[in-house]
Amino acid sequence: MPENTIIANDTSDVISKQQFEYMKLISQIMADRKRGEKPMAYIRTYGCQQNVADSERIKGMLEISGFDFTENPEDADFILFNTCAIREHAEDRVFGNVGALKALKRRHPQIVIALCGCMMEQEHIANKMYKSFPFVSLVFGTHSLHRFPQLLHQTLSEGKRVYERDNDDKKVYEGIPVKRDGTFKGWLSIMYGCNNFCTYCIVPYVRGRERSREKSLVLDEARQMINSGYKEITLLGQNVNSYGKNLPDKPTFSDLLHEIDSIDGDYWLRFMTSHPKDCSRELIDTIASGTHISKHLHLPFQSGSDRILKAMNRHYDRKKYLEIVNYAKEKIDGVSLTSDIIVGFPGETYEDFKETLSLIREVEFTSLFTFIYSPRVGTPAAKMPDPISAEEKSKWFRELLDVQEEIAAKRCASMVSGIEKVLVESETGKNGELSGRTSGNIIVEFKGDKSLIGTFQNVKITQARNWILKGELA
Ligand code: SAH
Ligand code: SF4
Ligand code: F3S
């Protein structure tokens, strides 16, 4: 088994042995084509961690099929774009970048080009791409990922284009090999899909119904990761707070978090994303009393206006959101709060927007992911009247960034002269400087040897530069 590859335990839903047979067949075909040289794959991933985790599974299947990986599409025998549909801008980038592969395919006609991911689950987009890009050999959606070896084999052996969109969005497929990108930070999917249907959001349409992985399998995988040296595990799901609802014994997310936290070892446990409507006090107590659970809560509120939250179908109001946040501040010492915000939802007025500003001032988030509303075909919001101009929305957006910059700077400044435990992640590129993150997910830069990457270090904070901390090894 290649290093860094984990095969999850089998369940009744194990991907059929057949897929492993296809991986073998692919490796034979590629060995013939390459006359013994290693075939190379180039994988480009757009979108959220869910897609990153999917790409890691695709890489796991490719590795067993004999492939090695390259960062240069020119060197590749197989190119795959794993796409994201969350906003128009994300889709435009994919269209542009796939279009640019036409010349590459002309120069190297033997390259096999494939598209997968969330955009391919939108029928009108998948059809358009399949038609517009005849040099693409394989198109498949998120629900067909477990059959990727079979689909790739079909393209390779028949030399035909393959287009596959499966409607099965209710199962969890276990047993897919995973090749994680990182050796000390890793993603661990605990559930797939989403049932919330926020009115602006495409995810429930492209990822299907919410379904959780069995708790024992998640625990086994967490144990394997910890034993193989992972220092940070991030549990993934669109709404981790509703983990377990479809499982027979209905474990809660708090139960799962607590049980993983009980595994011995030197690691941090993170999770994303929490939905405020299901964020329980019990969960906050679990974080507060945890040994490995990081003191960070990413809790997207989207808008500070109750009228807009209702139109978004978010199932909580400003008051409830602030109650949870205040409880978290009270219980979790030094908690770091982050959030996602949408500016310019259809019908939002400047008065509504001001409610968002006042909420971020009140909470004092460490950082924010801010987005201008982007209409998605097929979602209810796309049909709502949207009279505010793009220029006006951009103005509000900049105002939001200015306010948040001030808040983040103030928050970081309050950490100066304290000592923070940091997971060292990388070199900054500036001479001899390293970059890491605190438990609250704040970036810290400090001088140190690169052999420290992948270890925990105590760093004395000496300076705050906007939302980045500077320090020295303590
Ligand atoms: N499941 C997560 C979020 C997933 S999408 C949650 O509910 O919090 C990540 C973020 O993208 C969302 O939180 C939202 O802020 C943003 N987003 C989703 N759809 C969008 C749209 N149509 N336009 C702009 N931003 C959007
Ligand atoms: Fe989208 Fe809402 Fe589901 Fe998050 S909870 S993925 S925003 S529908
Ligand atoms: Fe994008 Fe799909 Fe994630 S739409 S944000 S990659 S779930």
Image: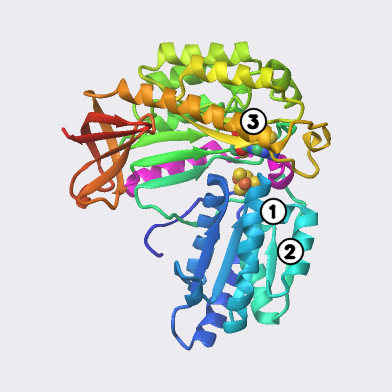
Give how far apart the Cα atoms at labels 1 and 2 are: 10 Å
Q: Ligand 3 closer than 8 Å to the CB at disc 1? A: yes
Quadrant of the image containing the N terminus: bottom left
- Magenta segment includes 155: no
Q: Secondary structure at mark 3?
A: strand
Q: Does 428 sit above or below residue 243?
A: below
Q: Ligand 3 closer than 8 Å to the CB at disc 2? A: no
Q: Position of residue 332 (x, y in %)?
A: 40, 17
Q: Does 278 sit above or below residue 39?
A: above
Span colored in magenta: 201-230
Q: Residues within 10 Å of mark 1 (few under 14, many from 20)?
A: many
Q: Nearer the viewer, mark 1 or mark 3?
A: 3
Mark positioned earlier in the residue sequence (1 or 3): 1
- Give the residue displayed 23% in from the left and 23% down from the top: 418
Q: Disc 1 designates what residue? A: 119
Instruction: Identify which amino acid the numbered label 3 is placed on.
Output: Val
Q: Residue furthest left?
A: 474
Q: Residues within 10 Å of mark 3 (few under 14, many from 20)?
A: many
Q: Disc 2 designates what residue? A: 129
Q: Quadrant of residue 474?
A: top left
Instruction: Identify which amino acid the numbered label 1 is placed on.
Output: Met
Q: Disc 3 designates what residue? A: 343
Q: Position of residue 151 (x, y in %)?
A: 67, 68
Q: Secondary structure at mark 1?
A: helix
Q: Residues within 10 Å of mark 2 (few under 14, many from 20)?
A: some
Q: Nearer the viewer, residue 316 or 411?
A: 411
Q: Position of residue 258 (x, y in %)?
A: 44, 27
- Magenta segment includes 216: yes
Q: Secondary structure at mark 2?
A: helix
Instruction: Identify which amino acid the numbered label 2 is placed on.
Output: Met
Left or right, 71 with respect to 97, comes to left
- Give the residue displayed 66% in from the left and 15% down from the top: 317
